[in-house]
Image (spheres, grey):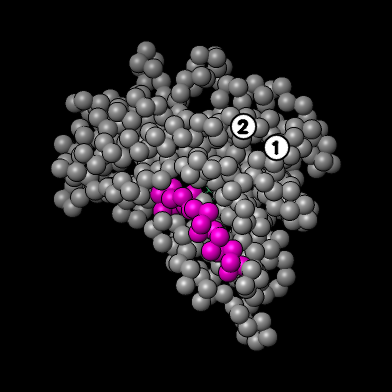
Amino acid sequence: MSQKRTLEESELPSSKKTKDSGEPYVIELRSDTLTKPTEEMRRAMFEAELGDDVYGEDPTVNSLQEKAAAMFGKEAALLVPSGTMGNLICLMVHGNSRGSEALVGDQSHIVIYEQGGISQIAGIHSRQVTNRSDGTLDLDELESKIRKDHSDPHYPITRVVCLENTHNVMGGRVIHPEYMEKVHQLAVKYKFKIHIDGARILNAAAALNLPPSELLKYADSASACLSKGLANPIGSIILGSKEFITQALWMRKLLGGGMRQAGIIAAPGIIALEKMSKRLHVDHENARRFAEKLAELQPLGINIDISRVDSNMVMFSLLPGKGTREKFLELLSTPMEGPGGNYEVRMFDSGKDEVRAVFHYQVTADDVDRAIQKIETVLQTL
Ligand SMILES: Cc1ncc(COP(=O)(O)O)c(C=O)c1O
């Protein structure tokens, strides 16, 4: 693809090509991590006022951090390169003494997709609690796994409990403040901290129609991605008290996450927070409509529970006799005869019997119909 972009091209709702280019029309549903920055974001990068952020002198980074802290109702915020580093830094601060343990969901991103960084790098023992299909942890199991006897040297000490909102592996499930309050009661009783992996916390806020600060009310720390559905190319924000963020700054430098003229990513990050977050409900509407239309394809072999669609993700499976997910996904992205046959629809094999489709700003309401058309055609060939 040419590096030169015109305004018209880059304002297209997706990276897909038009009919004229002769290339396939791509509907990218694998993940919201595939979003590209908008033209306004690219312009903001170009125009950003810069300084050395390791010296604390990048005005655009400072502005982003102040805005993020205010928006999430925390004393301070820190820009970090990724969600993975954000989670790691937060846990390094909470578990900054030998013998620390973190309670984490067995289906959490921290456990499955972060290479065990909290043990590998932070020296924290992780103990897993069953994730329920709604993304929460079973409270009885959670309570039973908290280390209560701090006088017995056999045991580590539970320093932190991690929750994920929205929950990725469970299909974008949203955790409600009422549940958070119950975990908070345990935190007060047993003196541990609460960390939220809020890579998509603004999706949760949009789904519940609540200010983001309500969702972090009971959290001692959180990480929130500026990329993904918010379309920033790079970056996450971590949030907490001033004291927490001061310690986090030390950990960020240790990990090599101190960035110099980081205003380049903070400038579009401000647009991500202030503008892109306000349109997430559109992605949720598209996800729901897609799920409802998929449910109508049940006679052709689709198995879906639409009550599981809380935000921008849809999980579904194929009924027995419809072949493998691999074949289904391959056909979806292959040109074929029949209605919608020319659309290249990309989805993600969740590896757990299910296929995942994720909705984001590069997917329009018309794309929902196009994707359904292609799915129907593929199902008829299977
Ligand atoms: C729930 C969750 N947490 C953390 C991350 C990690 O973010 P990053 O890819 O920026 O490291 C992701 C990425 O998809 C995620 O879904």
Q: Is there a contact, CB below 8 Å, between mark 2 and mark 1?
A: yes
Q: Residue 274 carries which label?
A: 2
Q: Residue at x 47, y 72 (%)?
A: 140
Q: Circle 1 — which element?
A: helix
CA separation in Å, label 2 and label 1: 9 Å
Residue under circle 1?
67
Q: Residue at x 64, y 34 (%)?
A: 269
Q: Where is residue 177 in the image (x, y as percent from the top left)?
A: 53, 54
- Residue range of the region highlighted in magenta in the rendering: 166-187
Residue 159's image quarter? bottom right
Location of the C terminus by quadrant is: top left
Q: Where is residue 196 in the image (x, y as percent from the top left)?
A: 58, 55
Neighbour tally class for label 1: few under 14, some 14-19, many 20 plus, Cα within 10 Å: some
Residue in the foreground of this view, choosing between 193 and 169: 193
Residue in the foreground of this view, choosing between 32 and 333: 32
Please report whichever mark, 2 or 1, sits nearer to the chain's N-terminal start.
Answer: 1
Name the residue type under label 1.
Answer: Lys
